[in-house]
Image (spheres, rainbow, N blue to C red):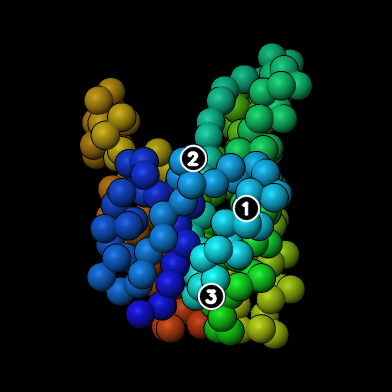
Amino acid sequence: MRTLVITGGTGGLGTEVVRRLSSEYRCIVLGHAQVDLTSEDSVRKTFDDIGEIYGLVHLVGGWTGGTVRDTSLDSWSKMLAVNTTTAFLAARGALAHMTKPGRIVVVSSIATLEIAGGSAAYTVAKSALNALVQVLAREERSNGITANAVLPDSMATPAMLKNTDASKLVPLDRVSETIAFLLSDAAAGTSGTLIPIRA
């Protein structure tokens, strides 16, 4: 059974993704208790300890609102750290131990395609994540390693369902099924794609 590392696999989406993938893969879930994804040393040591893997599913992220005028440097830095730097460090750590072929899938946001005001730092950070995925796809093509991003709209997590009609949210299984396809052998020719997922 091939091994996947799933970062951030303990939240609403993460729980569903792990449930969907655990019958096909050996899933190693990395949360805050297992690794500091903003620390180069922590990430390197964690992946060294895990050893050979087939794929990385990166679910870590965060949101904060604010226009450019209203966004503090601290908020800006935190959004880049949690949404972009964690993915960079996780991908680099994973690539050192990834089989050929291999897979990288990250969760970005539809907000990067349908840009609106009000969440400047978040939108920029997720847009940088998209660029990272496309760079990885180009750089790792000759190694048989694909890199793709899913870009869901607001998702039907337990927290969101408390305040929002389910019909206006993306079902979690829709996201997990898309991730499962991108990990599959059938997706060997799919790389560098940014896949929007709408309700």
Does label 3 or label 1 sit earlier along the sequence? 1
Residue occupying the point 40% across, 38% down: 154
- Residue 52 in the image: state x and y as whole percent: 53, 75
Q: Quadrant of residue 38?
A: top right
Q: Nearer the viewer, residue 60 or 164?
A: 60
Residue 32 visible from this viewpoint: yes
Q: Categorize mark 2 by other alpha carbons within 10 Å: few (<14), some (14-19), many (20+).
A: few
Residue lying at 28% horizontally and 23% vertically, measured from the top left: 163
Q: Quadrant of residue 161?
A: top left
Residue 148 seen by the camera? no
Marks 2 and 3: CB-CB under 8 Å? no
Above or below, 198 against 11 in this view is below
Q: Earlier in the sequence, mark 2 or mark 3?
A: 2
| Label 1 – label 2 distance at C-alpha | 11 Å
The dot on residue 43 is 1
In the rendered view, tell whether residue 53 sits above or below residue 85.
Answer: below
Label 2 sits on a secondary structure element that is: loop
Label 1 secondary element:
helix
Up/down of 120 relative to 56, above or below? above
Q: Residue 185 appears at what percent x and percent y? A: 43, 83
Position of residue 159 measured from the top left corner of the image (x, y, whole percent): 31, 29
Quick one: label 3, few (<14), some, or many (20+) residues within 10 Å? Answer: some
Q: Residues within 10 Å of mark 1 (few under 14, many from 20)?
A: many
Q: Secondary structure at mark 3?
A: loop
**Nearer the observer, 109 or 136:** 136
Q: Residue at x 47, y 62 (%)?
A: 5
> Which residue does the numbered mark 3 point to in the structure image?
52
- What quarter of the picture does the N terminus occupy? bottom left
Q: Nearer the viewer, residue 64 or 81?
A: 81
Q: Amino acid at mark 2?
A: His
* Residue on which disc 2 sits: 32
